[in-house]
């Protein structure tokens, strides 16, 4: 991604998300419910819930909304029947795609995701067919315009908190962490008054692939748009160099 603006991509996604903030909050609400069911309502003793809370805050979900979601989930554990499922496949030009979904109907979700791949001239593959091309990392993006610190000071704050890597782009900073260090590092940055444009545990491609063919680009975008519109889809990862 050298030479590319991560913030520009994140900002584009954020603007898109802001138009459907209700959907984003619904998605995170489901994640909170599943995390509480699996590990209880205390984020200090529930690592998955702590990660979801960090993601919720990065998406500007109000604290009282987060707390209500946890309390509701804690009182309704027996009725939480969502399940995490992951699909892997290829888009046009061999672009690797991973789709994380949270569903109460796997048949519906599988059919919708297969349809998204097919309409974009791609194909669903077997589990593990593309995930080896990605590294699971905590990723935090900070806009330079929102950061009160100098780059060196921010880097030291992040590294002292346990971050693995720090990089500077044209208009943003990127911090990478081990997944199990993500919550602690995002909390340290929050306490330091650092606003985060994006903070989540994600899949980082080891290499990016360019698409020169316009038809392939349109087909890939069709798949990504269909996946983005699916209420069961939580996240989509790919190695397309946009």
Image (spheres, rainbow, N blue to C red):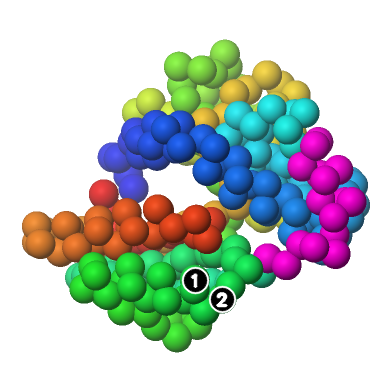
Q: Which residue is mark 1?
A: 109
What's the residue at 68%, 53% (across, down)? 31
Which element carries disc 2, helix, strand or loop?
helix
Answer whether residue 79 is magenta in the image: yes
Give the percent coordinates (x, y) of residue 162.
Answer: 71, 43
User: Which of the 4 image quadrants contains residue 156?
Assistant: top right
Q: Is residue 236 visible?
A: yes
Give yes or no for contact between labels 1 and 2 (Cβ–Cβ under 8 Å): yes
Per the rendered image, the range of residues in magenta is 67-82
Q: Which residue is mark 2?
A: 106
What's the residue at 30%, 40% (across, down)? 4
What's the residue at 21%, 73% (across, down)? 121
Answer whether residue 36 is magenta in the image: no
Considering depth in this image, is 69 or 219 the residue closer to the camera? Answer: 69
Give the percent coordinates (x, y) of residue 66.
Answer: 75, 36
Q: CA distance from mark 1 to mark 2?
A: 5 Å
Horizontal relation, residue 43 to residue 156: left or right: right
Considering depth in this image, is 66 or 42 the residue closer to the camera? Answer: 66
Give the percent coordinates (x, y) of residue 49.
Answer: 77, 50
162 w.r.t. 212: above or below: above
User: Which of the 4 image quadrants contains residue 60?
Assistant: top right
Q: Farthest residue in the top direction?
A: 148
């Amino acid at each position: 991604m050298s030479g590319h603006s991560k913030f520009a991509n994140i900002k584009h996604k954020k603007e898109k998300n802001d138009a459907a903030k209700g959907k984003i909050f619904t998605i995170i609400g489901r994640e909170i419910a599943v995390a509480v069911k699996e590990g209880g309502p205390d984020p200090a003793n529930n690592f998955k819930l702590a990660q979801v809370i960090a993601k919720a805050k990065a998406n500007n979900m109000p604290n009282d909304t987060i707390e209500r979601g946890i309390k509701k989930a804690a009182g309704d554990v027996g009725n939480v029947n969502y399940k995490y499922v992951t699909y892997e496949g290829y888009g046009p030009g061999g672009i690797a795609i991973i789709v994380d979904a949270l569903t109460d109907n796997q048949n519906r979700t599988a059919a919708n995701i297969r349809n998204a791949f097919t309409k974009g001239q791609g194909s669903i593959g077997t589990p593990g067919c593309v995930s080896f091309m990605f590294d699971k990392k905590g990723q935090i993006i900070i806009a330079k315009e929102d950061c009160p610190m100098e780059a060196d000071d921010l880097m030291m704050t992040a590294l002292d908190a346990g971050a693995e890597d720090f990089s500077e782009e044209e208009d943003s900073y990127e911090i990478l962490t081990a997944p199990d260090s993500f919550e602690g590092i995002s909390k340290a940055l929050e306490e330091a008054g650092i606003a985060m444009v994006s903070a989540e545990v994600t899949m980082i491609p080891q290499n990016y692939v360019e698409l020169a063919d316009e038809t392939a680009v349109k087909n890939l975008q069709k798949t990504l748009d269909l996946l983005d519109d699916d209420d069961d889809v939580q996240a989509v990862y790919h190695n397309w160099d946009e």
